[in-house]
Amino acid sequence: MNKPLFISLLLCLCSLTTLAQNNDSIIVDSAKVTQPEITNPNYIDEVVWIVGDEAILRSEIEIARMQAEQEGITWDGDPDCRIPESIAVQKLFINQAALDSIDVTESEISQAIDQQINGWIQMIGSKEKLEEYRKQSITKMKQELHDEFKNRELAQRMKQKLVENVAVRPTDVREYFQTVPEDSLPFVPTTVEVEIITNQPKIPQEEINKVKDELRGYTDRVQKGEVSFATLARLYSEDPGSARDGGEMDYVGRGMLDPAFAQAAFNLTDPSKISKIVESEFGFHIIQYIDRRGDKIKCRHILRKPTVPQKSIDATMLRMDSIAADLREGKFTFEDGATVISDDKDTKNNRGLMANITEEGRTSRFQMKELPTEVARAVENLKVGEISDPFTMTNSRGKTVCAIVRLKARTEGHRATITEDFQLMSHIVLEKEQAKVLKKWVQEKIKNTYVRIDDRYKGCDFEYEGWIR
């Protein structure tokens, strides 16, 4: 089963949890659960598999099937058999993670859930529309997603532990490449390498003073007991990740925070006190202490970002246009310009070259869909070596910047070759070797785990042997 499907199944199981927790008349006995199905209020749920001490409900399987159909996912074999088997395999990994004391922090779970919910909000249009669609608050969604996201991460970490010593040699990659028919080699989409120079428009001091005065006003209101910090955060904070939770952040270490923010936050010890105004690369903050566990702190904050006036943007755009003209005339190189002129911390020390950080590692190659939208739009019609006209964009820190880009290289879509795509081929071979290790582990685990399955599945052609006893 591929990774997207794995994630989809887990999110489906979250929906099942939602159904169960929203129904007050669930009756559980040794193998039956009465609860509403999405389309049939008289649906009788039941336990159809037991793996160790974990039960798999028929509703879990049906929801996973519906999700797979919606996403156009196909199965190697009969879905009626492969779907419950895939769920059972995940439970084996989760169980072993518990035995091996593999853990996931609350901060990591919270971050993953926030990413999922923010993705839903972007798709549906607003927080209010999402709450209306799911008929529950954002807080309730987070509560119900918690365990499933935790289990997903536990299973993934267990897999990583099992394959951490698997490696492939260059000779393994070459041998694999030679055995694969040319028309079966993976197709590599068009990729580009892009250099960028950005300048941040100047914010007038009066705008900064205005934001600071507002933050001081919030502090005064909280200290006078007029309103809670959390209420003000919900109303005014410009941090989308925490504002809806009253500015509350989960337990986090110093290294995960902006240095100035971390210094102020870790100096707080009294929940009744509020920090002085802190300037970070994201804007201006005030912070309220909640709790501390070892080297991690939990706090609330309110973020305000000074508004960039249009006249500052226009002035910076004119400057970037002049820089682009000088570059086209060869007065200096783009790389030297990026090193000296650019405000972008992520690329300045890399001579302007943008980096694409993925699960497979760090590369300078991007598929067009992986670039920020504004950059992709600017690059789309450039020839190699050409420089774009200036444009505005929002950087990774949520700030408006003016930018120009240069297309350093373009590699058209093609069938993978050992010379141009060695890293890709190495990753494919490594995945195959890891899959062999995981399959062998699952096969052995099944032999030593209590399994009971409903009679209807005993005629299945499963991927793994040993389910039927």
Image: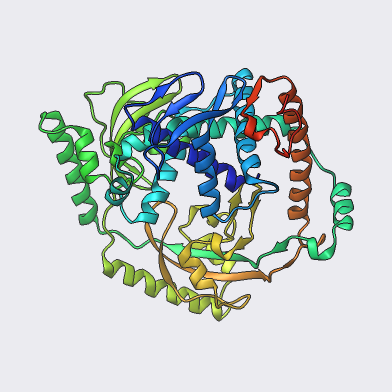
At x 61%, y 45%, the residue is 3
Residue occupying the point 65% across, 34% down: 457
Number of numbered discs overlaid on the protein picture:
0
* Depth order, front residue of 246/128: 128
Of residues 67 and 260, which is closer to you in this image? 67
x 15%, y 32%: residue = 222
Residue at image coords 53%, 45%: 8
Lateral position of residue 22 relative to residue 326, left or right: left
Q: Tell me where residue 92 appears, x and y as whole percent.
A: 64, 27
Q: Nearer the viewer, residue 337 or 182?
A: 182
Residue 333, compared with residue 241, is above or below; it is: below
Compared to 170, does 229 lie above or below?
above
Q: Pick the residue in front: 329 or 251.
A: 251
Q: Quadrant of the N terminus?
A: top right
Q: Quadrant of the C terminus?
A: top right
Left or right placement of residue 206 versus residue 391 in this view: left
Q: Position of residue 276 (x, y in %)?
A: 25, 35
On the image, which quarter does residue 207 sit in? bottom left
- Horizontal side of 20 relative to 73 (left or right) equals left
Residue 184 appears in the picture as rendered: yes
In the displayed orientation, state which residue is furthest to the bottom: 329
Res 108 visible: no
Give x and y (percent) for residue 253: 46, 29
* Spot occupied by residue 215 in the image (x, y as percentages of width and height): 20, 42
